[in-house]
């Protein structure tokens, strides 16, 4: 089903491209923009993102401060709010509502104290994973990961060996978009 979808998208793209000379490039730009989520963030509750790894993940905080990495509210970054986290050899996996063409992922690694994370981040489409980030001592802060434009249906953050202070990988918030 997904493969068929992708095939149809490619065919459509080619048709638009061949129309391009005659009708100008407006329609192909429109189509590209839609595939790229209109250049806006595609990860949030409102955008229908699913945390399909939730059974292997933990969350700190409660109520309005429950640490789910899809929230759009302003975050308190305190000792007890460590977002969504997972233990060594497990992952935080975000499924997008649909396929998007993307090139940027922003992860806010919990930085309530100074620490370095050992993690790998993958973008995938139809279970074909591409490494887009791999560091043994990523500084705790919001990291912006640029990767070559590709169709993505999932992101996976793999906790390879915790961080310099504890065994977890803690993410306060994730955003993904196509950056022009
Ligand atoms: C995602 O949701 C936000 C907030 O509702 C909205 O502004 C944005 O346009 C949505 N992005 C997409 C790609 O639907
Ligand atoms: C955060 O969650 C972990 C795992 O559930 C728990 O061990 C820890 O006590 C929690 N921390 C706080 C401050 O709630
Ligand atoms: C993680 O996986 C590696 C390789 O399989 C293993 O050597 C290590 O003991 C595991 N660590 C934990 C904490 O499960
Ligand atoms: C997997 O994804 C990469 C990066 O997008 C691509 O270069 C490669 O051709 C894909 N492999 C398969 C088998 O689809």
Image (cartoon, rainbow, N blue to C red):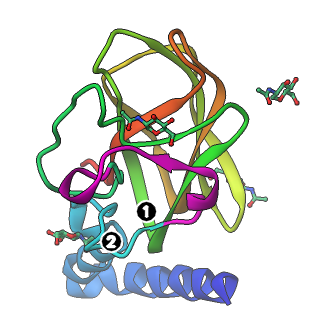
Judged from the image, the secondary structure of the residue bearing numbered disc 2 is helix
**Placement of 138 over or under 60, stated as above or below:** above
* Residue bounds of the magenta highlight: 51-66
Nearest to the observer: residue 18 or residue 68 = 68
Tell me if residue 22 is in the magenta stretch. Answer: no
Q: Position of residue 31 (x, y in %)?
A: 31, 79
Q: Farthest left residue? A: 74
Q: Position of residue 69 (x, y in %)?
A: 35, 51
**Placement of 129 over or under 19, stated as above or below:** above
| Residue at the spot of label 2 | 32
At 45% from the left and 80% from the top, the residue drawn is 13
Horizontal arrangement in the rendering, residue 134 relative to residue 68 (left or right) = right
| Residue 38 circle label | none
Q: Position of residue 61 (x, y in %)?
A: 31, 46
Per the model, the C-alpha gap separating discs 2 and 1 is 8 Å
Nearest to the observer: residue 126 or residue 83 = 83
Horizontal arrangement in the rendering, residue 86 relative to residue 178 (left or right) = right
Q: Position of residue 64 (x, y in %)?
A: 19, 57
Determine the image quadrant of residue 171: top left
Q: Earlier in the sequence, mark 2 or mark 1?
A: 2
At 23% from the left and 60% from the top, the residue drawn is 39
Q: Quadrant of ligand 4?
A: bottom right
Determine whether label 2 and label 1 are within 8 Å by CB.
yes
Q: Residues within 10 Å of mark 1 (few under 14, many from 20)?
A: many
Query: From the viewer's perspective, is the residue at label 2 or at label 1 nearer?
Result: 1
At 21% from the left and 31% from the top, the residue drawn is 77
Judged from the image, the secondary structure of the residue bearing numbered disc 1 is strand
Determine the image quadrant of residue 52: bottom right
| Residue at the spot of label 1 | 101
């Amino acid at each position: 089903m997904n493969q068929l979808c992708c095939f149809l998208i490619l065919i459509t793209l080619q048709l638009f491209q061949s129309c391009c000379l005659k009708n100008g490039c407006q329609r192909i730009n429109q189509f590209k923009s839609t595939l790229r989520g209109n250049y806006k963030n595609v990860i949030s509750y409102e955008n229908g993102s699913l945390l399909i790894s939730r059974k292997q993940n933990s969350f700190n905080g409660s109520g309005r401060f429950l640490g789910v990495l899809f929230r759009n509210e302003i975050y308190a970054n305190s000792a007890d709010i460590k977002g969504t986290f997972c233990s060594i050899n497990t992952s935080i996996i975000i499924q997008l509502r649909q396929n998007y063409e993307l090139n940027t992922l922003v992860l806010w690694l919990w930085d309530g104290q100074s620490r370095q994370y050992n993690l790998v981040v993958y973008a995938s489409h139809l279970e074909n994973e591409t490494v887009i980030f791999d560091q043994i001592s990523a500084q705790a802060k919001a990291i912006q990961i640029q990767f070559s434009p590709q169709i993505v249906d999932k992101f996976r953050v793999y906790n390879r060996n915790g961080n310099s202070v504890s065994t977890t990988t803690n993410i306060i918030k994730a955003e993904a978009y196509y950056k022009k």
